[in-house]
Image (cartoon, rainbow, N blue to C red):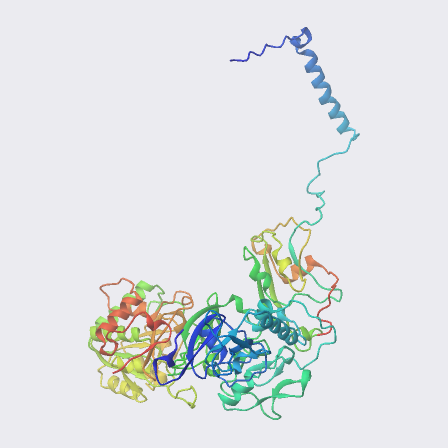
Amino acid sequence: MADPVSKTSAVERVNLTVDGRAVSVPKGWNLIQAARKAGFHVPHYCYHEKLSVGGNCRMCLVEVGLPRMGPDRKPVLKADGTPEIGWLPRPQIGCATQAGEGMSVRLNSQLVKECRRSVLEFLLINHPLDCPICDQAGECKLQEYAFQYGGGESRFVEEKERKPKKVELGPRVTLDDERCILCTRCVRFCREIARDDVLGIFNRGSHSYISCYPGRKLENNYSLNTVDLCPVGALTSTDFRFKMRVWFLKETSSLCASCARGCNITVGSREGVVHRFKPRCNDAVNSHWMCDEGRLNYKWINDERRLKKPLIRASGSAKWDEALAAARDALVRNRGRVAILASGQCSCEELFLLKKLAETYGAVVKLAPAHEGPGDNLLVETDKTPNMNGVRLMGFEAGREVGAKLSDAMAKGEVAALVAVRECAVAAGVDAGALKKMDAILAIDVLPSPTVEMASVVLPGAAHVEKTGTFINFQRRLQRFHPAFAPPGEARTDLWILGQLPGGDSKPLDYEKVFNRMCGETPAFQALPWEPLTEKGVEVEW
Amino acid sequence: MAIITPRPQLTLAERLYLPAIVSGMWLTIRHFFVNLLGLKKKFTLEYPDEKCPPPPGCRGAPTLVRDEDGREKCVACQLCEFVCPPRAIRVTPEALPPGSRHAKIEKRPAAFEINMLRCIYCGFCQEVCPEEAIFLREKTILTGASRRELVHDKQRLLALGGSRPDSVKKWKDK
């Protein structure tokens, strides 16, 4: 496992033995972390590496022993020279026990197994056992651990505690208190990460339940992270509730395209329909979190109005080869009078091909309008496009005045053909009347827009979850996203379309080849590794 | 060493063949009249009018059942859809409307389709169902004029399934 701390020699390290395996960890690590480093998993509910230690679920109980000291304050050695271990009489919780020098830990002794079984029996006492209607079923830690470590039977014959169900904690989160195991991860998340202290535990003993403080609501922009954190099905996403069982979802590593942060996400899709976005851990970018806004910004991908067929406005033809030929004709006809309107939604590779296209057809202007909005000091950036740094790196002019610049060039008669990729010229501030006078507008887009309505050739492209590519986020970190499924209908990936436009070599472009060509021709990407880019991304400098 | 089997020595009656022919004819004529007059039990069924009673444990068409109160037992957990080897089942879940009598169950299938052209009558769906809502019933002969007709929707499945008393009543106290 990656251990970033170990490279700095300043950190003091301790040596311990976990289930007979010797491991050295930085001082301050707890036993769950130490066991993970040794290659073992300690079951736990309330512990989360990015939150403070709660220590209330008792699931991570392990046996701990320290070297027995002789009267001379030196470890007593056994006959074979190894120190004799004095095992503590009671098990300790792994999350709140720091690894110590010479410590020994047992993860699978009879005592530990008994502890886990008993803890699970306690946790299940008031659990409604309604897995068939619970959204968490399939990714529920209570289910998983009950199978792995549980006793399988309950001796509890009394009435189960009744608690509030289907509580709307906020606009996006629904709570089922009966399923809650009171691990307080959500409470700690709101207090420590979201800095919006609205959740708490009310009542005592088995009557305890989670709720919002009176008059407050869980409505901050990070509220859905509590759903991810919830190890059971107590906190559910109102949006995802009852939509799809998780075991049907195909999980694909991708990026959120809602702002310049580029949060790492997992796309959950089934048969070409996106059902949810979930954050994927990347400590350099988004840790384990993502904002609700970005998380729920997937519905447009499943939209009915998605462009599914190419179109030549004049003839009404909807054939790819004819549409591409018409597009090439328009570009050749207007050579030297072409404007390119790119987008921060385009991947670096697409921008690279657009740049090549601009060179081939002598583009007058290469622009990309800015999209700005409110940000915050946790994750949300003010720049609402995922790849504005890529746009700048590829030599496009980005900013708010892009529309005015394009209008100017059009007014001067320098531009007769416009290539608009994932951007609407009207929305950028260009007068629709002036656009109508253009000789040709080529629109590569996913959804209808005024520009698409006016375009002489419409080429349906792909959403970012339908294609592969890279984005450079605001930290100048180059990150890759992967396709979850193919674009709808006859739509193609933008990379394929852009590869066809220059004409001549009309072989479909291989993504990896484009990437390598881009790296070769872009100084900032020189000697960029192809392989390590997949998971966490790399920072680029220019 | 070769074993020499001697050729049987036939009697005169055997050599004539006539007694054998007569006895064969007699057998045929006897059966003809026994069947004509209905003197003996018939083993064949007049198929479209008469049908073979299904043996106990026969796995026929999968159906959805209601409990004794008329509640659809299926809660749309989609386990049958998951386990179905030929992927014949397609469930679309939805939340129960708030005013419903069974609102505490929270979830039900908005649509439940079993494609009987794909179904292999394996019974996995019945086995996996945590709600005892899907049962393979005796109906084995399914005919239709179109493919669409053989994709059983929820109404059809409930009509075929009928009601089945609920022995557990797990939702009663929820």
Which one is nearer the viewer's eye here, A114 or A157? A114
Q: Nearer the viewer, residue A14 or A143?
A: A14
Snapshot quadrant of residue B19: top right
Going by the image, does A324 lie left or right of A180? left
Residue B109 vs A409, above or below: the answer is above
x, y percent for residue A456: 32, 73
Q: In this view, does B23 lie to the left or right of A236?
A: right
Numbered disc total: 0
Instruction: Tell which residue pokes out farthest to the front in this image.
Output: A72
The answer to which of A351 and A436 lies nearer the viewer is A351
Q: Nearer the viewer, residue A486 or A510?
A: A510
| Residue found at the very far bottom of the displayed protein | A215
Query: Can see residue B22?
Result: yes
Quadrant of residue A426 within the rendered picture? bottom left
Q: Can residue A447 be seen in this view?
A: no
Q: In which quarter of the image is the C terminus of chain B?
A: bottom right
| Residue A218 position in % (x across, y down) | 56, 87
The reply, left or right, for residue A167 in relation to residue A77 is right
The quadrant where residue A283 appears: bottom left
Provide residue A381's location: percent of width, then percent of height. 39, 87
The reply, left or right, for residue A493 in relation to residue B153 is left
The image position of residue A178, as x and y in percent, is 65, 78
